[in-house]
Each structure stands twice: as C-alpha cells, then as structure tokens.
Amino acid sequence: MKKFVIAALGGTLTGALFAMQVAGPLLAQENAKSSNVYEQLDLFGDIFERIRAQYVEEVDEADLIEAAINGMLTSLDPHSSYLSPDDANDMRVQTRGEFGGLGIEVTQEEGFVKVVSPIDGTPADAAGIEAGDFITHVDGESVLGMNLDEAVELMRGPVGSEIVITVVREGEIEPFDVSIIRDTIKLTAVRSRTEGDSVVLRITTFNDQTTPNLEAGLEEQVEALGGMDNVNGIVLDLRNNPGGLLTQAITVSDAFLEKGEIVSTRGRNPSDGDRFNATPGDLTNGKPIVVLINGGSASASEIVAGALQDHRRAIVVGTKSFGKGSVQTVMPLRGEGAMRLTTARYYTPSGRSIQALGVSPDIVVEQPRRKAASEEDEERTKRKFRSEADLRGSLDNDSLTEDEIRQIEADRAKAEKAAKLREEDYQLAYAIDILKGLSKLSSD
C-alpha cells in the first residue's frame, strides 16, 4: 500500500513539474505578447500627441482617429472598412434599393478603383462603363494612394452634377475619359420577360426586394405564357450582379431547390460556422434552368450560381465570376458609425471555396463586343439574303394553304428574332438555345 501511495505521489509530482515546464514558457510568451501590444498602443498614443501638437496645421482630432481606425481595417482586406455615420446610413438606404450616385459597384486593386460591375439602367451603365474597368482619376484627380472610401466619396456629388472619370480598360491602348451625370439610383432588383417559351429573370442586385420581385416576376411571365406547362425553362441572368445580402442569396437559391445545402460559412473559430439548407418547394416545378454569369458576378451571385451548379439544378453559362468568397458583418459602433469586418468565408454545397477563384461555368461562352455596322455593310447584307421571291415575275407557291403559309412565316419570324438576339446578346441567346434543346429532348 505504501508503495502505491509513494508511486502515486511521485506521479503527481512529475505531472506538476511537467505542467510547470510547459505552462511556464507559454505564460511567459503570452505576457510578452500582451506587453508588446501595450507598447504598440503607447507608440500610437505618442504619435497621435506629436501630430496634434507639432503638425504644420491644426488637425481635427476626430478625423485623425477615424482615419487611423479605417487604416487599420482596410489593411486587412479590400472589403473591411470603417463606416462613418453618413456612410452607415447610405449603406442602410442602399440595401432598401434606392440611393444616389453613378450606379457602379467597386473594389480596390493595385491602388486603383476597379469596377466590379455597373448596375443596369444607371448613369454608369448608360455611359458604357464595364466590369473590369480601372478608374484612375476623378475630375482629373488621381485616386492612387486613396483608400476605397475616399475614392468613393470623391465620386459622390449632387444629383444632376457632372463627373469625369478616367478609365483604363483591357484591350484599349490609352486611358480615356467618360463623362457621367450623377443621378438617384433606383434599383429594380429583378427584371422579368419572356424570350420565346423561356422566362428570363435578370437579377441586378440582392437587396430586401430581390426575392419578392423574383417570385412576382416569375408568376407574371408564367401567366403570360399560359401556365408552367408552356414554359420550356428559366434563364437566371446574374451577369454584372455585384451581390448584396447573404439572406437574399439563400432565399433565391431555395426558390429553385427542393432540399440540400445551399451555402456554409466558416469563420476563425469552428463554432462560428453556419450551414443553410433548402426547404421543400421549387417555384418552377423542376423546369430546366440556365444561369448566366461573367466577371461582374460577385458575392451573393456566386452563392446562387455555385449552389445550383453543385446540385446539378442548373447549367452555368458565361465566363468565370469575380471570386469574392468572403462574408462581411456590419457591426454598429458608438456614435452611429459602423464597422464592416470580414468574419468568414463561404463554401458551396460541395465544400469548395470560390475566394479569388470564382465560379467556373459549365460552358464557357464569351460575349463578343459589338461593332458598329456601316450603311455599306447593311446594304451588302440585304443583297446577300435576297431570295427567289424577290425576283421579278417569280412563280407563287400554290401547294400550301394560307394557314400553312402563315405558320411558316410565324416560325421564320421567331427564328429571325432569335438571330437578332444573338447579335444583341450572344450569351443570352446561347442560354435560350440550351433550353430549346433540353425541351426538345424531353418531348421526344
């Protein structure tokens, strides 16, 4: 018994010594780290006092501290930032779907402002601004060296006022100036229409209105075609959609899925992760879906495209998306300001992160740039497509009834409309052709 007690005591002493040997250095490292942090904060206070006392001009202390906070946040990644009370209010207004400005979603790359995408129907869109454009100057002032908030603030101004931005575009040899008139931006989250027997749902942003607009637009177009049985499929157009609310990306995806994961988020701590699943009910009753994406499709757009692609619920067509696979949380701060902080990465149902990689389409289809046709080209095209019926004195076709002739002419008109769509929007026409092919296969 004594031997057992002595052995147990020896084990206890050994364990205590081991704990001291391990915990000692760890505690010392932690204390050293804390001490270093306090030294750095003392350094910050010393610099702040010297600026306030010795800078060549009197400084606004509040502005100085705000700039320091923003610098700390923007050093983390392009999407973390400090929001002043005015900026925080602008963001809340924007998520409701109406705000003032040019109508572009921007980020920062290599010191310049990069256009993620222009927003449909806005001054920037009308002026020809494209996803991937770099803005180097605003009214002649260089944005190099500015943080993103400063550059955005420079582009703001009264509605109706003019702004000239200098743009660098891939494929263009020289930078060029674009004049834009600022306007109030009223976002229509979803625009719906029909192309033949297909319903086209163009989602321009993910705000509070997106899912209600989607449901209402789909219902309206299905009714116009005489019911879902007459619909051959859905085109979900997410091109140049810069994203928005995560909740809306989830509900839009859920509208077309019966079950399964939509997206998961993983933060710094495993316990901070979230997983979002679809609920039963598909608004289209399983009709084929083609999702259109391009380099201007970011964030929430990529969540939707990735979820529908991983579940094999849709064919993704277009070009690689932007690749913003991070989640930002807006945290209110004292004084009515806020902090936008990157808190997690999101993952598609198959477990892939699209951060910096983007969603790769199932079928890569480039959108060719349109060239202005000259009058000579148009006349040459007309001469090329003259037929027998155009010849003087040609014989009539008396083997068909009037109804058969009308049907042929109607079919030809539909084909010509499709051909015109290819000239105006090749990617959309390609998507429509896929739905036609799938519809043909399912009916045979």
Image: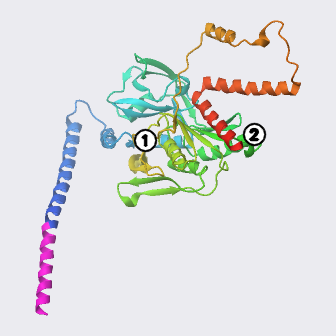
For image coordinates 50% across by 44% down, the residue present is 300
Seen from the viewer's position, the closer of residues 416 and 237 is 416
Indicate the quadrant where residue 187 lies. top right
Which amino acid is tagged 2?
Leu
Write down the region rendered in magenta. 1-21
Q: Is residue 441 left or right of residue 279?
A: right
Coloring basis for residues: rainbow
Q: Main secondary structure of the magenta part?
A: helix
Indicate the quadrant where residue 396 lies. top right
The single residue placed furthest to the bottom in the displayed view is: 1
Q: Which secondary structure, mark 1?
A: loop
- The span from disc 1 to disc 2 (Cα, nearest Å) is 37 Å
Q: Which residue lies under the disc numbered 1?
A: 324
Q: Is residue 127 left or right of residue 53?
A: right
Mark drawn on residue 225? 2
Image x and y of residue 343, in percent: 39, 50
Q: Which secondary structure, mark 2?
A: loop
For image coordinates 20% across by 48% down, the residue present is 40
Seen from the viewer's position, the closer of residues 292 and 271 is 292
Marks 2 and 1: in contact by CB < 8 Å?
Answer: no
Image x and y of residue 173, in percent: 40, 16
Which amino acid is tagged 1?
Lys
Seen from the viewer's position, the closer of residues 31 and 193 is 193
Query: Is there any visible trace of residue 367 in the rendered image?
Result: yes
Residue 150 among those drawn in magenta: no
Residue 168 vs 360, above or below: the answer is: above
Image x and y of residue 442, in percent: 68, 44
